[in-house]
Image (cartoon, rainbow, N blue to C red):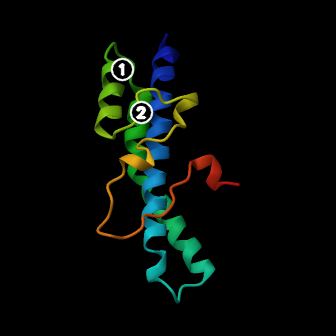
Amino acid sequence: AAWLGSLEVLPTVAALRAHALEIADQVVHENAGKWESASTRDLERVDAVARAIVNRLLHDPTVRMKELRDDRVHARMALVRDLFGLAEDEGSLGLGAGAEESELPASSGEQLAEVRRLRQRRR
């Protein structure tokens, strides 16, 4: 029965990670023009650091969510989805986007970078 709770948690964990990585990617791309002297290798390092920050920030909450085994798992996952603006229906293991591009706030006159899904980034 413990594995049933984890089935409910995994889509939320995956959606949260995908959402956080999309935000990190967006911020890196929005600022890419400010590093005109940066080499391709430097930009790859910046991207790696941004991903490392996301991974470290989400590690403990992810572990805690996966360890949840009580009758309030559904309510807790609904709260996490609500707090982070994750889609109610995360789709296949939560790989749906958290906030759609049209929901992102426009920056002060700057063009926002394209936000791609995790699967698109790895191609």
At a point 31% along the width and 20% down the height, the residue shown is: 75
- Compared to residue 87, the image places residue 72 above or below, namely above
Amino acid beneath label 2:
Ala
At a point 32% along the width and 55% down the height, the residue shown is: 105
CA–CA distance in space, label 2 to label 1: 17 Å
Q: Is residue 75 visible?
A: yes
Q: Is residue 55 visible?
A: no
Query: For the residue labelled by badge 2, is the local secondary structure a helix, a strand or a loop?
Result: loop
- Disc 2 designates what residue? 87
Q: Which callout, 2 or 1, points to the residue nearer the camera?
A: 2
Kindly check if marks 2 and 1 are in contact, taking CB atoms under 8 A apart as contact.
Answer: no
Query: For the residue labelled by badge 1, is the local secondary structure a helix, a strand or a loop?
Result: helix
User: Residue 119: x, y in percent?
Assistant: 63, 47
Q: Residues within 10 Å of mark 1 (few under 14, many from 20)?
A: some
Q: Is residue 96 left or right of residue 72?
A: right
- Compared to residue 43, the image places residue 8 above or below, namely above
Amino acid beneath label 1:
Val
Image quarter (top left, top right, bottom left or bottom right) of the C terminus: bottom right
At a point 58% along the width and 49% down the height, the residue shown is: 118
